[in-house]
Image (cartoon, rainbow, N blue to C red):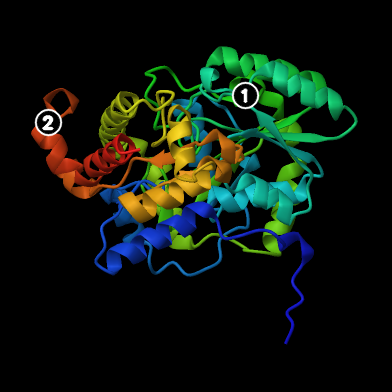
Amino acid sequence: MKVPLTSSIAGLNESATLAINIRAREIRAQGGSVCHFGFGQSPFPVPMPIQDALRDHAAVKDYLPTLGLPELREAVARFYQQEMNSPFSAEHICIGPGSKELIFQALFVLETAVLIPAPSWVSYGPQAQLLGKPVYTLPTRREYHYRLQADVLEQVCQQLVDTPKLLIINSPNNPTGAVYGEDDLSALAEVCRKFGVIVLSDEIYAMIDFTGQSHQSMAHAYPEGTIVTGGLSKSFAAGGYRLGVMLIPDPLCALTKALQTVVSETFSTVSAPVQYAALEAYGHFDTVRSFINQTLEIHRSVAEYVHARFIGMGLNCPEPQGAFYMMPDFQNYRASLAKKGMTSDEALCHALLGEAHIALLPGSSFYLGPEALSARVAFVDYDGGDVLACWPGKDALTTEKMTDFFPHIIAGCDRLEQYLSLL
């Protein structure tokens, strides 16, 4: 029987990040060796206070309010005010099954074109495509750490002056590790205010920031027009809990009502025990603060090691400032790669998986051109529980301890260096 699929799904494939994770796991399950730089999941165990709260509320079976547990919405509002300097009203906070789903719901209810800096997270564009939204990718440059520049945004806005627009900003950034600073955001905010652009600020990595500066958000520079998303998956290491938050400013409060309507007809509400676990994370943040700080130090240590190795190999790679990603390119090897028939990032990543047993994602999965020969590296392939239990502190991290803690990371760098040396 022919299955009459909707036309919006034509040309879409499974999320590249999820697909590479499945492939790497298959290789390992079959006894193969692979250094898995393809999937961005926190390697650490869920903090025990959050686990305890989940267990303690396992018997809670009733449906919770559509927008979320009221106490949780209040706790999220306090958390963002105290920790992120981003005041939002609890009444305009929505709890959903992951920030990914909340972004999709927001794209559904907002009648806008979608502006996406290139590179950006893999799912923004496909979500918009599924909903039939026009998508415009905005170029960035490596010398600016792939951060969107205000003049580029203004040029696109001038071309779409009569079209409602939604800009998606992600900082710290997946796939580059870039962090937008105050000056960057102020310049972008000026353009957004001029053209009435709504901003969706994806801040899922907000607490994995290596800069040492206070948190910077478009919600600070452009509070009247910025929606913020976050959740449990990255800093709280609870991706599988599937809980996200969306914070909507008062001037955009119509979005809250629209989301409530759509949610009531779709996922209804997030699992009650998970919402109580999130209440522990947001409402009693001091119980997990040391976990957040220690894991941040570990992420930073691995980032510095991998970046130094890549620079030593002759790769172009902006230093990551947050999250657990970086984006090197292999343009300095373009001629050597071309001799082996590799003129695209997909061909390169395919060869690295098959020949060097390194799993990477091509930059073209993140809206860059395949000729850029770029790849996204996720540097979290290690046993976070073991590392966390024995972490001596960054200053006491010896070469021997690095080898013990991060064998797949080091092996992946070694394999890549060896592969490039033979080109």
Q: Quadrant of the C terminus?
A: top left
Residue sitting at x 29%, y 54%: 34
Q: Which of 155 and 308 is in front in this view?
A: 308
Left or right of residue 29, residue 336 in this image: right
Residue type at mark 2: give it.
Answer: Thr
Which numbered marker is on residue 148?
1
Question: Picture quarter containing residue 140?
Answer: top right
Question: Picture quarter containing residue 302?
Answer: top left
Instruction: Please rate how many residues cluster around mark 1, counting C-alpha atoms within 10 Å: few if below 14, some from 14 to 19, many from 20.
Output: many
| Name of the residue lying farthest toward the left | 400
Q: How far apart are marks 2 and 1 (CA)?
A: 37 Å
Q: Can the viewer see residue 401?
A: yes
Instruction: Please rate how many residues cluster around mark 2, counting C-alpha atoms within 10 Å: few if below 14, some from 14 to 19, many from 20.
Output: few
Q: Mark 2 points at which residue?
A: 399
In the rendering, at what x and y percent does residue 204 appear?
Answer: 49, 39
Q: Which of 156 and 317 is in front in this view?
A: 317
Residue sitting at x 29%, y 35%: 421
First of labels 2, 1 by sequence position: 1
In the rendering, at what x and y percent does residue 296 appear?
Answer: 31, 32
Q: Vertical placement of 309 versus 74: above or below?
A: above
Left or right of residue 2, residue 326 in this image: left
In the rendering, at what x and y percent does residue 291 appear?
Answer: 27, 38
Residue type at mark 1: give it.
Answer: Leu
Which numbered marker is on residue 246?
none
Q: Can the viewer see residue 72?
A: no
- Label 2 sits on a secondary structure element that is helix
Q: Which of 345 and 412 is in front in this view?
A: 345
Residue sitting at x 48%, y 61%: 272
Q: Vertical placement of 423 versus 143: above or below?
A: below
